[in-house]
Amino acid sequence: MQQRPLGRTGLQIAPIVFGGNVFGWTADEKRSFELLDAFVDAGFNAIDTADVYSRWVPGHQGGESETLIGRWLKTNPARRRQVLLFTKVGMDMGDEHKGLGRLWIDRAVEDSLRRLQVDVIDLYQAHRPDPETSYEETLDAFDRLAKAGKIRAFGCSNFDARQLAEAQDSARINGLPAYQTLQPEYNLVDRASYDGPLRDLAIESGLGVIPYYSLASGFLTGKYRTEADLGQSARGGGVRKHLNPRGLRILGALDQVSQRHATQPAVVALAWLIGREGVTAPIASVTSVEQLKSFSAAAELVLSEADRVLLDQASAPDA
């Protein structure tokens, strides 16, 4: 499977990144191990998680996803040479452990390294902007971690165009390395926050871009088309907002393109992202090995110009 450079990080990644939010939540340890093995065996190599996954689950404290990934690596140490590990810092871990200050980053990275059972994190990301901490302090903390060999590259997530530009300016003014990657929310139905100034800046800056919610919490699989469908999974409630004329128009376009290629809507939705300028590789999650087949199909699917025009028009924010 052809890999692509993740911006200027020096990392090479396959066209889809596995979203590790499901590990320890909708996928237990046995299923998580099966998914990770199948993912790597299919030729993919990047796994994205965060320290906070899955703190939202009753009884969880955060760190569950990283811990399961670490256990998986422990069962087969050779896997470490086959995968790149991406994780994030900054969300509330309880007891005021949050944000992007140097002291918390220094502690949080050690916690993540311990849970993952590795010596180095390939991509360490600011999970969201921290208005209480200067960009300089955060970038300096990441730079120190990179120089210490604890992380290979660093990026940001959930930054808007203004915040990213300010962070890049701070790096230049203070003689620090700038963010190398961006993780925005982006998919066929949620385009407005990335398309435009943020995407333009990411392209201009040569950032590696790994968008999350690539299937809009499952909406773009096509399995949610009426209110009655929302009870099919734990994430069904998150797609209610898309059950409107525009959302249904997008599903209609996905149906047309998927029929042309004898494939599924999810495959087309991922292929649209993979081929989109300003995207390196989308992040996507599945909870069964059968669903994982959509990743390989999407990586191989080449959409025609007519396919793209149809999808672009149906999903245009002002459509």
Image (tube, grey):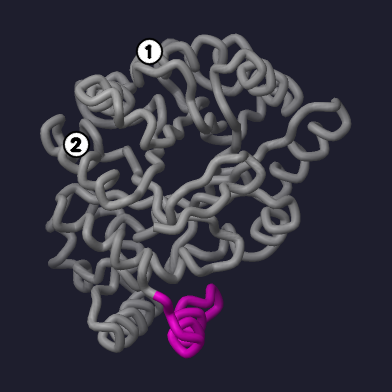
Residue at position x 43%, y 11% in the image: 95
| Image quadrant in which you'd find residue 282 | bottom left
Residue bearing the label numbered 1: 114
Residue under the image location 34 percent in, 46 percent down? 18
Q: Residues within 10 Å of mark 2 (few under 14, many from 20)?
A: many
Percent x, y of residue 20: 32, 38
Pick the front one: 216 or 120: 120
Q: Is residue 64 visible in the rendered structure shown here?
A: no
Q: Position of residue 185 (x, y in %)?
A: 49, 53
Q: Is residue 91 magenta?
A: no
Q: Is residue 158 left or right of residue 229?
A: right
What's under tag 1, amino acid-wise? Answer: Arg
Q: Give the position of the N terminus as an image quadrant.
A: bottom left
Residue 230 position by quadrant? bottom left
Asked if residue 95 shows in the view, the reply is: yes
Label 1 Cα crowd, 10 Å radius (few <14 / some 14-19 / many 20+): some
Could you give the CA–CA distance between mark 2 and mark 1, rounded to whole angstroms? 19 Å
**Left/right of residue 260 with respect to residue 277 in the rendered view:** left
**Residue at image coords 70%, 52%:** 206
**Residue 10, percent from left and from top:** 61, 40
Residue 68 position (above or below residue 279): above
What is the chief secondary structure element of the magenta stretch? helix
Residue hosting label 2? 32
- Circles 2 and 1, Cβ within 8 Å, touching? The answer is no
Placement of 46 over or under 59, stated as above or below: below
Dividing the picture into quadrants, the one containing residue 61 is: top left
Amino acid type assigned to the residue bearing label 2 in the image = Ser
Magenta region, residue range: 302-319
The residue sitting at 57% across, 47% down in the picture is: 6
Magenta segment: does it hold 306? yes
